[in-house]
Image (cartoon, grey):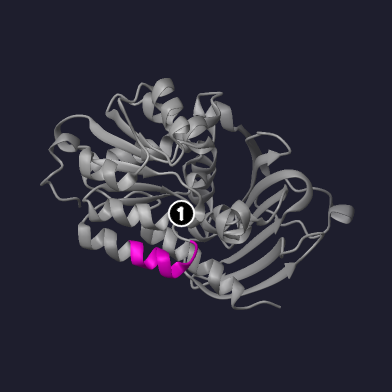
Amino acid sequence: MAKKQGNRSAAGGKVKVGVIGAGGIAMGIHLPSLRRMESVELVAVCDLIPERAAKAAAEFDIPKTWQSYPQMLQAESLDAVLVLTEPDQLYRPAMACLAAGKHVFMEKPPGITAYQAGTLLRAARAADRILMVGLNRRYIPLVQHVLKLVRQRSTINQVDGRFNKHSSADFYGGCASALECDTLHVIDLVRWIAGGQPVKAALVQGQFDSPVPNSWNGVAMFDNGATGIVRANYQTAARVQSLEIHGPNASAFVNLGFGDASCTAELMFFGGKGTQSLSSAGAGKQEHLKLDGREIAGSDDYRVVFGYEAELRDFIECIQTRRRPLTDIEEGLKSLQMVEMFRANLL
């Protein structure tokens, strides 16, 4: 899909990458992952705080540091740029990179409103560049494997996603709500797995020991008949993330953390006879399957187990093969639109 002009390096050799933002997500996730990819050449890193850029450059052998991303875009020969800034600072660097003819990977959310995401989509299409959003949960090997197994045995009629934390919902100093900035991960998973477009939605919003709302329980109906349920609460004992997928012949529970970095799943397949009452008829003869996410991923590395490295590999491969990624900007926009659909229907 990308123009060949000005992209010879990506087509015939290593993809030359620059990074905007040298904070925790860059240092802990993205730069270590990129360094392991033979098809990537890390060219430059930019941060408003020069010491952070210098630290990243030293740790990951990056030749050049910049404090100004417009200057970096003008001076450096880059195929792609990772924009790893805070949510309210993602939009303008991403737009500038597209205007400079670069492929872009941006952290979520793809703008703090669907309007911003829509503008980014139009800019990416006009420039014929890839714009990928960091919705890594779709790339978790366990999630992909579970979804494959469920779909082999059943249609899907319900998807439940949960994301709890003991944290402020006033994200990044109040630039936007956790619903757009964080719970978006679960909303995106539910929408993607349900497999249709949401046509109706309703949201119950709570506010516990907080200056802003910090609890959301939503339900959505999709045009294919599936139901999506989203639960988030930022005043719970610890971080909890889980996913349930249900259909007439298969059910799955995916544990993506219960106060820890656990990654496991249990699947159950219909055994040919319905169970109306456990107390009177006993349990059915369902087939059960337990899965370990680290075993599925073939690694204990957090970046691999939770899909971060896979999403970056997909980004680089999409540049090389001219295809759109699983979490293209269009997908990010649709998930932000679902957030806004929920907000428009508060109960």
How many neighbours does mark 1 have within 10 angstroms: few (below 14), some (14-19), or many (20 or more)?
A: some
Residue 255 seen in render: yes
Q: Tell me which amino acid carries mark 1.
A: Gln
Compared across the picture, whether 241 is left or right of 34 comes to: right
Can you say whether 195 is above or below 139 in the image?
A: below
Task: Depth check: give the residue in front, 277 or 6.
Answer: 6
Farthest right residue? Answer: 279
Label 1 belongs to which residue? 89
Q: Is residue 242 above or below residue 220?
A: above
Residue 303: image location, x then y, percent:
51, 31
Quadrant for the C terminus in the image: bottom right
Q: Mark yes or no: residue 159 visible.
A: no
Q: Residue at x 21, y 58 (%)?
A: 127
Question: Is the magenta region chiefly helix, strand or loop?
Answer: helix
Closer to the camera in the image, 206 or 94? 94
Give SS at disc 1: helix
54 or 203, which is in the foreground?
54
User: Is 127 placed left or right of 306 in the picture?
Assistant: left
Give the total of numbered labels.
Answer: 1
Where is residue 165 drawn, in percent x and y?
72, 48
* Residue at image coords 52%, 31%: 28
Horizontal side of 195 relative to 326 (left or right) equals right
Residue occupying the point 38% across, 50% down: 326
Chain part drawn in magenta: 112-120
Q: Nearer the viewer, residue 323 or 121?
A: 121
Q: Is residue 114 magenta?
A: yes
Quadrant housing residue 14: top left
Check the image and report above or below for 126 versus 18.
below
| Residue 248 to residue 262: above or below | below
Q: Position of residue 103 (x, y in %)?
A: 27, 47
* Coordinates of residue 222 in the picture (x, y in percent): 53, 70
Left or right: residue 30 versus residue 159 is: left
